[in-house]
Image (cartoon, grey):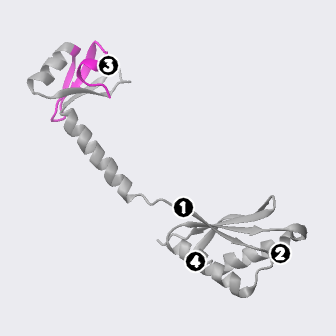
Amino acid sequence: MRINEEIRAREVRVISSTGEQLGIMPLRDALRLAGEQQLDLVEVAPQAKPPVCRIMDFGKFKYEQQKRDKEAKKKQKIITVKEVKIRPNIEEHDFNVKIKHAQRFLEDGDKVKVTIMFRGRELSHPELGKQVLTKMANELKNIAAVEREPKLEGKNMIMILAPKTHN
């Protein structure tokens, strides 16, 4: 945003500090008007013909803007992707432990990337890995939705689960 002397246009459309239109006037007159009120002339719509300028306290405006931005940042939820790694021939108890980990991540609002690592000859049977991932998705279907179906990438098969939003 350009303020006061930084404004390049010869004529500007001026809006007062109360929000009423003061019309189109030469830049010099608009600056004088703002100066008389001890406020700044701020270019709010530089692409308009002629550019639109507003008389306001620029320092206060910037401060309010920063407060709004900070408040908006507080309200955002940063979603991270947590990873659970398993093998295609995982035992039942180990599988249940991994389910509990994934469940905890999902309840915290994070996405879960479930990776099955194949080694050696296991790679010749990717359907075994797909069965394990499908079983995991079924176990967690009440709290998670499959965001990305199981897909083989190199020696790993990856599936991404996202927490279900409760409306």
Comes first in the chain, label 3 or label 1: 3
The image quarter containing residue 35 is top left
Say what amino acid the circle numbered 2 marks.
Leu
Identify the magenta region. Answer: 1-27
The disc at residue 50 is: 3
Q: Residue furthest front?
A: 120
- Residue 96 pos. (x, y %): 66, 84
Comes first in the chain, label 1 or label 2: 1
Say what amino acid the circle numbered 1 marks.
Thr
Say what amino acid the circle numbered 3 marks.
Pro
Q: Describe the element under mark 2 as helix, strand or loop.
A: helix
Label 1, residues with CA under 10 Å away: few <14, some 14-19, many ≥20: few
Comes first in the chain, label 3 or label 2: 3
Q: Which residue is mark 1?
A: 80
Going by the image, does 50 lie left or right of 23?
A: right
Q: In front: 152, or 88?
A: 88
Total marks placed: 4
Disc 3 to disc 2, C-alpha distance: 68 Å
Comes first in the chain, label 3 or label 4: 3
Q: In front: 9, or 109?
A: 109
Q: Describe the element under mark 1 as helix, strand or loop.
A: loop
Q: Which residue is mark 2?
A: 128
Q: Which residue is mark 4?
A: 103
